[in-house]
Image (cartoon, rainbow, N blue to C red):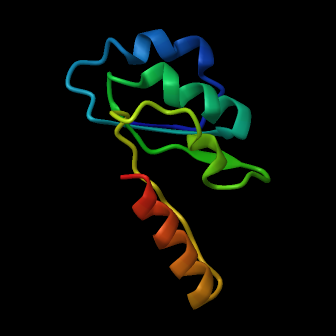
Amino acid sequence: MHCCANSRHQWNGFLQIPNLRLLNIIQPAGVVAEAFPFFHGHVAQWHACTGEAPPFNLLEGLYPETHIVLETTAATKEEAIRSAEFQKTLG
């Protein structure tokens, strides 16, 4: 399910959606940082930030069992290699 609305007040309801497999919330970095631990253990997550935000700092402190999709872009081959190397460290 994709949601780019200001939906923090609906998150408990999202947990009630039968067979929800993947949740995609597009919000500012602070909201996305709250979403990862909130939905941990309930649904795989593929969130993205609006505005300026380092792509991976939001993953600090996640439980090892948190299922996430990481999406990243790279302007250069070297940047893509660094991103891929970082993602390998996650697990």
Residue 88's place in the image compared with 20, above or below, is: below
Residue 46 picture quarter: top left
Residue 17 in the figure: left or right of residue 84: left
Residue 14's place in the image compared with 80, above or below, is: above
Tell me residue 66's x, y (percent).
38, 34
Query: Number of callouts in the render?
Result: 0
Residue 88 in the figure: left or right of residue 76: left
Tell me residue 51's x, y (percent).
78, 51
Tell me residue 77's x, y (percent).
56, 89
Indicate the quadrant containing the N terminus: top left, top right, bottom left or bottom right: top left
Who is closer to the viewer here, 76 or 61?
61
Q: Residue at x 61, y 25 (%)?
A: 34
Q: Residue furthest right?
A: 52
Q: Residue at x 59, y 22 (%)?
A: 7
Q: Residue furthest left?
A: 19
Residue 45 in the figure: left or right of residue 49: left
Residue 75's place in the image compared with 51, above or below, is: below
Q: Residue furthest bottom?
A: 77
Tell me residue 52's x, y (percent).
79, 53
Q: Residue at x 60, y 12 (%)?
A: 9
Q: Residue at x 49, y 60 (%)?
A: 71
Who is closer to the viewer here, 74 or 56?
56
